[in-house]
Image (spheres, grey):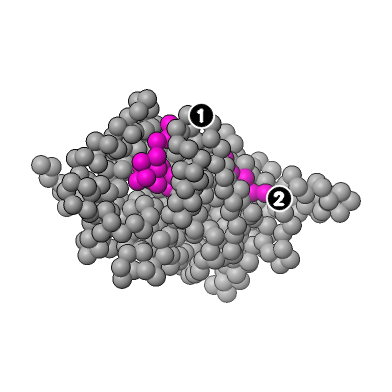
Amino acid sequence: MKIYSQDTKKRISILAIIILSVFGTTSVDAQTDNANTGPNSVFVKDAVKKTFEQNASPLRNYLFSRREALIKLQSLPSEELQAVTLEARTTAEQRSGLRRMRIRGFQIISDSGTDFAGYNVGPGSPESQVAIIASDLADSYLNQAALRNIPVDSLRIEIINRPDTVPANKVNYPRNFLYTAYIKSSADDKQLEELRKAAEANSPIFNFILKPQVVTGEIDYTRTPDKLVIPEGGQPGLREYLKYKRAAYLHLQEEGKKREEERKKNPSLANNENRNSLVVTVNNNGVRQLQIRQFRILHDNPAYLGGSDLGPTSQEHQLGVLTSCLTHIFLIQAAARQIPLDSLEVNVKATSDIRAGRSGFENVPGYPYGIHYTVHVKSPATYEQIKVLRDAVEAVCPIYNLLKDEQTIEGRIVKIGN
């Protein structure tokens, strides 16, 4: 018998709740039949194991171990579970302006292209958002395949945001999503269609994006001296970076006016703009690889669920990309308004509750809710100027507005083999 420290027990409990939120709302009673016929019975286990071990596919074998973990966790009574707080934060680096996102012990870099005073060392927030949707769907497909004894030998999800006309007075962000799940499986078309419906119904981020979310914010403000003094041997900070950001911003504004004139002359040009096509591939151990241009990000589950804890969950990264986008738009709007900043960090918290859908918790969302961000800013500008800056950020931030608006996602399955 393994004995865990209190810190380890606490961490396992928190991770269990995070991961459990993607397992669906199958009742505990349905999962605890009698010893001979229930999902935990020896007879059922052997039959399920044979299903997954057919052809000895590594991913099938992984799904068997995931199924056991899901059923075990679903069997926990509600009184042993509680809501947890998910957190993410992004800091704007002093001299480069790149965004350093931190989620638990993980770090993801987000950056602008060289045309926007960045170094292109990480993906942008809008393209990351698209990939996060696909990753969470992939994880949900695995969960539902495991619970339904549907053998899957490989899984890859491609997702795009299809071009459409941005509604008047709406922020331009990725919308109108279409994903394609490429599945290698011996299951028939009816089983795969049932799998698609179940995966979409139980994917937290899929449903999170479909529904308008409430995002609230506050400002943690510190006034700094008007005159910046760089100590001997020191390096320029965020104030200096914003000068380059402003020059890039003004240049891109002019380029944007030119493109707008070209679009008026040739409307078809708009169809190829602001379109992200992303791929998420599932490894044989359940790790999801998000390929965003030349960048690769891993999403994973903790070890006790058959994963290797090599990356954050989709829900955690969802909060992270919100912090990254808010941080970037704060930099852009500060540069545009010539408001100096000496430091900038955005923290986001939300609640996740595994009991969602259970008896007594029918009205609890099965995705992160109660989203609240805090922007920590140090600046010689007045508090009133920072408030105006914050309002300008919320008005145009792509991910902030994407979450506040209702979205559409369409999915399909392509069977690639037996």
Q: Is residue 34 left or right of residue 411?
A: left
**Is 322 or 242 nearer to us in this picture?**
322
Amino acid bearing label 2: Pro
Distance from Cα at disc 2 to Cα at disc 1 = 31 Å
Residue 252 position (above or below residue 46): below
Q: Is residue 142 located in the magenta-colored stretch of the structure?
A: yes
User: Residue 200: which disc?
Assistant: none
Q: Is residue 87 left or right of residue 183?
A: left
Q: How many marks?
A: 2
In this orientation, does residue 140 appear? Answer: yes
The residue sitting at 74% across, 57% down in the picture is 165
User: Residue 163: which disc?
Assistant: 2
Residue with the most extreme top position: 55
In this orientation, does residue 290 appear? Answer: no
Residue 233 position (above or below residue 362): above
Amino acid bearing label 1: Gly
The residue sitting at 57% across, 74% down in the picture is 384
Crowding near pointer 1: few (<14 within 10 Å), some, many (20+)? few
Crowding near pointer 2: few (<14 within 10 Å), some, many (20+)? some
The residue indicated by pointer 1 is 417
| Residue 398 image-quadrant placement | bottom right
Q: Position of residue 336 (x, y in %)?
A: 68, 59
Q: Is residue 314 left or right of residue 209?
A: left
Which portion, as a residue range, is magenta? 138-163
Residue 130 position (above or below residue 168): above
Q: Is residue 369 left or right of residue 354?
A: right
Q: Position of residue 331 (x, y in %)?
A: 59, 56
Q: Is residue 269 located in the magenta-colored stretch of the structure?
A: no
**Is 120 or 276 nearer to us in this picture?**
276
Residue 231 position (above or below residue 153): below
